[in-house]
Amino acid sequence: MTKLVGACQLLALRDHSSAQETLCLMLEWNLLEVADENNSSHPCGGSAEERNSLPLQIATTLQSTESGRRLYFELCDRQLHLKELVILNILIKKKLN
């Protein structure tokens, strides 16, 4: 999968909107996170260090173009709102108990 991500990054750098959206979705759905460094069957393949650097590489790739930067900031905004909702939900549950 690492090779596919690399190809997608190259397309995203060339301002290909579908590739940029795909990279954003990979970040949003946490498809690149490594739960266990000893997990050799991870879909991204490669070493744990390579897999851990992919989200940062993708974020950098997205911020290299205006349209990618917009999509990435929209993703960050959605994630921030989601975290705020989770915190609010926790506070409400604590207040009810």
Image (cartoon, helix red, strand yellow):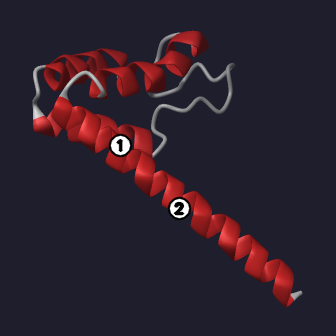
Contact, mark 1 vs mark 2 (Cβ under 8 Å): no
The residue under the point 63% across, 24% down is 39
> Compared with residue 97, is residue 41 higher up or lower down, i.e. above or below?
above
The residue under the point 55% across, 32% down is 33
Mark 1 vs mark 2: in front: 1
Quarter of the image with the C terminus is: bottom right
Query: Which residue ends up furthest to the right in the rendered image?
Result: 97
> Compared with residue 93, is residue 85 higher up or lower down, i.e. above or below?
above
The residue nearer to you, when weighing 32 against 61, is 61
Between disc 1 and disc 2, whose residue precedes? 1
Find residue 26 and report its horizontal and vertical position in percent. Answer: 37, 39
Residue 22 appears in view:
no
**Which residue in the structure is indicated by mark 1?**
73
The residue type indicated by label 2 comes to: Leu
> Few, some or many C-alpha atoms within 10 Å of disc 1 (few <14, some 14-19, many ≥20)?
some
**Which residue in the structure is indicated by mark 2?**
82
So how many labels did they put on this image?
2
Residue 85 appears in view:
yes
Find residue 43 and report its horizontal and vertical position in percent. Answer: 45, 28
The residue under the point 83% across, 89% down is 96
